[in-house]
Image: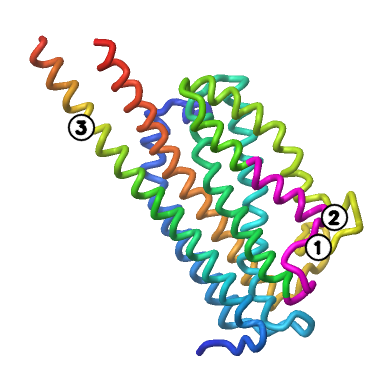
């Protein structure tokens, strides 16, 4: 049993058909539970008032926007090195999901920033690198659409993904590199004894798990669609030639 | 049941509204495109099987 078995489209379709309902169901349950807990059953913060409730959307969305790009990077590297089509299609499938999470992080960040910082937007290192990451997502999706040959598109988008990874990393660590921004450091860190108070932290962790599961479910679903679309294209080409 | 959001009600409710709208749009689009491609593939496969049978 090897992970490379899943590079076989048939094997991937069989396994994902079984896994998808479970992952999707769990993501709905976790997300609904986390958001209801966070929105209805947590107190206001002593400094930020009720805006602290935005954390349950902003932090998981921002985390997953960056991690989606990391997943796309790994899948692109597998494509570039081992030429497994499923990995290239998984990267393609993940891009709109990552872009949506980036939009959510940017929109909720602006809505949170206005009452707290007095501005919707600032050219802060973290915000700026996040905006550039958003543009990379748009460019990545546009490049897949612009190139007719799917293997060439996978090659070119793979290279774009490697370049964009710089901004994915910067989105996460910009506050550590440059200290002049408005955005605070990481709200959650594995090497801190306490991150935010447990009353906020516990529902936040549930929401993060919900976002991770939602990402997995959407990528599985969309990769299945991309595999079918690829086969459809191949059959139509064969039909035209015959 | 609705929590008291005070002067930040616009920021909080807009955040939840916009995020849920984006998520619903993404999920809806993914499901619809998935169904459409699956249906088209089934049609083409059925058509090609029929052609192969009549050729054979």
- Secondary structure under badge 3? helix
Q: Nearer the viewer, residue A204 or A97?
A: A97
Q: Nearer the viewer, residue A196 or A180?
A: A180
Tell me if mark 1 has few (under 14), some (14-19) or many (20+) residues whose alpha carbon lies within 10 angstroms of its own.
Answer: some
Q: Could you tell me which chain the residue with mark 1 belongs to? A: A
Residue lying at the far right in this picture: please name it: A179
Residue A199 x %, y %: 69, 78
Residue shown at 49% from the left, 39% from the top = A93
Residue shown at 62% from the left, 86% from the top = B5
**Disc 2 marks which residue?**
A175
**Disc 1 marks which residue?**
A183
Mark 2 to mark 3 CA distance (whole Å)? 53 Å
Tell me if mark 3 has few (under 14), some (14-19) or many (20+) residues whose alpha carbon lies within 10 angstroms of its own.
Answer: few
Magenta: main secondary structure: helix
Q: Quadrant of residue A197?
A: bottom right
Residue B44 x %, y %: 22, 28
Pointer 2 and pointer 1 on the same chain: yes
Q: Could you tell me which chain the residue with mark 3 belongs to? A: B
Residue shown at 66% from the left, 59% from the top = A106
Query: Is A49 included in the stretch rendered in magenta?
Result: no
Q: Which residues are magenta?
A: A115-136
Labels 2 & 1 near each other (Cβ < 8 A)? yes
Q: Is residue A112 left or right of residue A138?
A: right
Residue A149 x %, y %: 47, 20
- Secondary structure under badge 1? loop
**Disc 3 marks which residue?**
B43
């Amino acid at each position: 049993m090897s992970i490379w078995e899943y590079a076989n489209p048939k094997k991937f379709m069989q396994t994902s058909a079984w896994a998808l309902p479970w992952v999707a169901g769990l993501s709905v349950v976790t997300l609904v539970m986390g958001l209801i807990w966070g929105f209805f059953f947590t107190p206001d913060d002593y400094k930020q008032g009720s805006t602290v409730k935005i954390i349950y959307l902003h932090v998981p969305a921002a985390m997953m926007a960056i991690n989606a790009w990391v997943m796309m990077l790994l899948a692109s590297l597998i494509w570039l090195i081992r030429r497994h089509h499923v990995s290239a299609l998984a990267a393609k499938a993940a891009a709109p999901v990552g872009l949506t999470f980036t939009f959510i992080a940017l929109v909720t960040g602006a809505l949170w920033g206005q009452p707290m910082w007095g501005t919707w937007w600032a050219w802060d290192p973290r915000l700026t690198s996040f905006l550039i990451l958003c543009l990379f997502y748009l460019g990545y999706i546009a490049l897949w659409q612009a190139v007719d040959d799917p293997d060439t598109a996978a090659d070119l988008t793979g290279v774009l993904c490697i370049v964009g990874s710089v901004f994915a990393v910067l989105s996460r660590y910009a506050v550590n590199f440059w200290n002049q921004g408005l955005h605070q450091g990481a709200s959650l860190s594995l090497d801190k004894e306490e991150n935010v108070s447990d009353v906020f932290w516990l529902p936040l962790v549930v929401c993060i798990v919900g976002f991770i599961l939602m990402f997995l479910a959407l990528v599985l679903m969309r990769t299945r669609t991309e595999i079918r679309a690829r086969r459809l294209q191949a059959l139509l080409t064969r039909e035209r030639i015959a | 049941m609705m929590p008291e959001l005070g002067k930040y009600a616009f920021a909080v409710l807009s955040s939840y509204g916009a995020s849920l709208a984006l998520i619903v749009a993404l999920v809806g689009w993914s499901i619809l495109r998935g169904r459409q491609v699956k249906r088209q593939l089934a049609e083409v496969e059925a058509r090609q099987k029929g052609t192969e049978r009549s050729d054979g």
